[in-house]
Amino acid sequence: MDYSIHTNILIMLVFFVAGTIKGVVGLGLPPIVLGLLTAIVGIHPAMAMVALPAFITNFYQAISGNNAKVLSKQHWIFFLSATLFVGVGCWIALLINHQSMSVLLGMLLTIYAIAGLANFQFEIQQRWQGFFGAMMGSCNGVFTGLTGSSAVPGVFYLQSSGLSKEQLVQAMGILFTFSSAGLSIGLYLQDKLTITSGALSLVALIPAVSGMYIGAKVRKRLSIQVFQKVFFLSLLLLGLFIVFKNIVL
C-alpha cells in the first residue's frame, strides 16, 4: 500500500517523538508508534513498520554503556526465559482476545506507576533474583507475544533489582532487543512484512534514532530523583494510553 506525502511525514514524526521518549526513559517506542499509527494505517502495517526501528533502537540502547556483560551475567535467567516464552504468548494469542490482554497490560502499568510516584519501594534481594527472574521473564515473554509490548512485568523486575539509572536503561535495552527480534520473526512467518512496510520501516530508522539520541542527552542531565519521576510518569501515561486506545478507540 502506498501512502500520501502527508501520511509519510506524519509517520516519520510519530517515530521521532516515540524515539525521543525512549531516549529519555528507555521504553515506549512500540506502544506509542502502534497506538498512534494503527488509527492511520491499520494494526498490521503499523506492527511491520515498527519492527526494524524497535530492534535497532533497542540494540543501540543495549550496547550503550559499560554494563552489558555484568547485567547479562546477573540476569541471564530472566533474559532467557523472557525470550523463549515469546513463542508461547504468540500461540496463546491465536486462542484468546488479545485486546483484553492489552487492557490488562495498560492497567498493570498504571498501577505500578502510581505506586512508584507514591514512593512505594519493593526490592528483590540478590539471592531471590534467579527465582523471580525466571518467573517474571516467563510472564514477560507471554505478555510480549500477546500484546506486542515487552514492558510488563519485566520493567518491574529490573526496576526492583537495585539497578542504577544507566544500568536500568541498558537492561531494558537488552530485554527489548531479544523480545523485538522474536516478534519480528513472528511477523515474517505470518507474512506481515511487506515491501512497502519494510521500506518505511527502514526510512523510519532516521527519525527514531535521531529522537533517541536527543532523548538520551536529556536523560544524562537528569538527577536520579527527577529521572524516577519522569520514568514513573511516563509509565502512567503509557498505561492510560494503552487502556484508552483499546477501550475507547
Image (cartoon, helix red, strand yellow):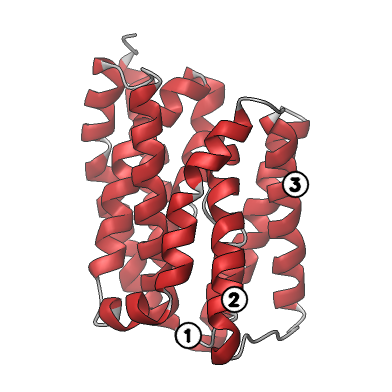
Relative to 80, does residue 88 appear above or below in the rendering? above
Residue 9 picture location, percent across and down:
33, 28
The quadrant of the rendering that contains the C terminus is top right
- Label 2 sits on a secondary structure element that is helix
**Who comes first in sequence, dot 1 or dot 2?**
2
Could you tell me residue 237's position as x and y percent?
65, 55
For mark 2, what is the residue? 131
Query: Residue 103's spot in the image, x, y percent?
Result: 74, 42
Which residue was labeled with disc 3? 104
Near-viewer residue (134 or 158): 134
User: Helix, strand or loop at disc 3?
Assistant: helix
Q: Distance between the residues labelled 3 and 1?
A: 26 Å
Determine whether the residue tagged by mark 1 lies in a helix, strand or loop. Answer: loop
Residue 139, placed above or below residue 91: below
Neighbourhood count class around disc 1 (C-alpha, 10 Å): few under 14, some 14–19, many 20 upward:
some
Amino acid type at image mark 2: Phe
The picture quadrant where one finds residue 182 is: top left
Q: Where is residue 224 in the image (x, y as percent from the top left)?
A: 50, 87
Q: What residue type is labelled 3?
A: Leu
Provide the residue designation for mark 1.
163
- Frontmost of labels 1 and 2 is 2
Q: In the depicted view, which residue is nearer to us: 43 or 208?
A: 43
- On the question of residue 25 being in view, the answer is no
